[in-house]
Amino acid sequence: MKHYHLVVLLLLTTAACNNQQENSEQEADQVTEDIQEVIISRDQYRNQLYGFWLGECIANWTGLVTEMDKVGNIGEVKTGDFYTREDWGKPDLPSIFSNGQPSDISPTIDFVFRSEGEVWGADDDTDIEYIYQHLLLTNQTSNLTPEQIQEGWLKHIKHEEENYLWVSNQRVLDLMLEGVLPPETSDPARNEHFDMIDAQLTTEIFGLFAPARPDVALEMAHLPIRTSARKEAAEISEFYVVMHSLASKVDTSASMDQQLRWLARQAREILPDSSYTARMYDYVQEKYESRIPWEQARDSIYYRYQVNQQDGYDITSRNIYCNGCFAAGINYAASLVSLFYGEGDIVETIKIGALAGWDSDNPTATWGGLLGFMLGKDGVEEAFGREFSNQFNIHRTRQNFPNDGIDTFENMSSKGLEIIDRVVQEEMGGTVDTEQNTWIIPAEEFDFSQRY
């Protein structure tokens, strides 16, 4: 009888928690629906952009330690079981590229930091975003043309190896050298890698350039995304762009987990229900809500998609590179594991992302950047209990930038504000209030269904 009462109590407690969460989510939705305009402090946004670059660098470099260590055991690729939470702090194992050697970034699976006086190096999850910010600023535009994108890529990306490009981006560069312009560079007839992960690495920042206005963000990101991606790979990139844009519209009185869940629900609306991307989202969400461990959710994703190719996800049949471990879809599903199970904690989210498998620096960089933006510089430092370097070396991976490629997060954030000033006035019909140092942005309900 005591056991029965305990079960009832647990069921009632769970129901109450679920109801409380549902009520909080409904209240958050209602708050956003009632907003007529959004007023954003430029000073606060500068701090948040700093947090974006800092959080993205922490997550990127931490994820690089385990990048491509664990991609599943299909065909000729044999990397052993996936990592679990118990592997955090233990020796790193070789990746599929490392000829049996562990990572040269860190011998153990742990956070990678750069202290004051040191320099963060650019990598492929930060450097093309840096290029796009530079191109928007120097061309004094909110919407890059095909010619501007081509000129920027050819000037700032090394043409020889090692040039830190994944498969679709490398094909894009090759096509640009032949004179092909975006979006033809992602045409499946020209670029067989159009459904790989590449655009996910390079375009989230467009959401931050259009705060609280995903309609404007998606317009700005449309061509950059389709420089290297089509179909579901483009949808996934747009999912991230929407989340980053709406991060300026969250109910900050809610918990960080509730804010992220609201952002994810809004971005889910952009995915056609018939697409594998929507089905992946729903599947991972269901696994999270069933309260199984994240490792079990990750393993089920591996079997459902990489092994059994369910929900219309068919990538391994094309027999490309490690059974599709560079593919947009499987890495998107892995990113959702760290998003849901991280529950708004930047430290835990990065840890899960680094251990989840596949291209493990990509999901970590995405969520590290988004959470870093939402927390701001000070919040990131508080979360990790320390201060970090503010210097960034874009010339580690790219070329032809001022000051021998050395920049600072303060300067990078100020450049972002200049771009947003133009976007607010020219694309949104808003106002830059110089007296209050704010943006006044007209709210606009965006009908995601019109994009299908």
Image (cartoon, rainbow, N blue to C red):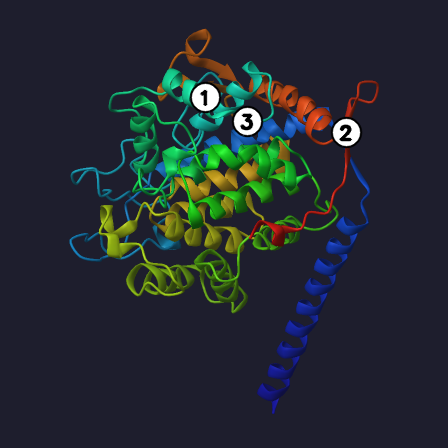
Q: Nearer the viewer, mark 3 or mark 1?
A: 1
**Distance between the Cα atoms at labels 3 and 1?**
40 Å
Above or below, comparing residue 237 to residue 71 in the picture = above
**Distance between the Cα atoms at labels 1 and 2?**
28 Å
Residue 430: numbered disc: 2
Above or below, comparing residue 176 to residue 299 in the picture = above
Q: What element carries label 3?
A: loop
Residue that label 1 marks? 147
Q: Residue at x 45, y 63 (%)?
A: 293
* Marked residue nearer the N-terminal end (2 or 3): 3
* Quarter placement of the N terminus: bottom right
Asked whether, in this view, residue 409 is left or right of residue 333, the answer is right
Residue 387: numbered disc: 3
At label 1, which amino acid type do we have? Glu
| Residue at the farthest right position | 435
Q: Which x, y percent locates residue 214?
A: 64, 41
Q: Which residue is drawn at 65% across and 27% down?
A: 47
At label 2, which amino acid type do we have? Gly
Viewer-side residue, 117 vs 174: 174
Label 3 CA crowd tier, 10 Å (few <14, some 14–19, many 20+): some
Viewer-side residue, 284 vs 93: 284
* Marked residue nearer the N-terminal end (3 or 1): 1
Q: Which residue is drawn at 21% across and 39% down?
A: 97
At label 3, which amino acid type do we have? Glu
Label 1 CA crowd tier, 10 Å (few <14, some 14–19, many 20+): some
Q: Is mark 2 on a helix, strand or loop?
A: loop
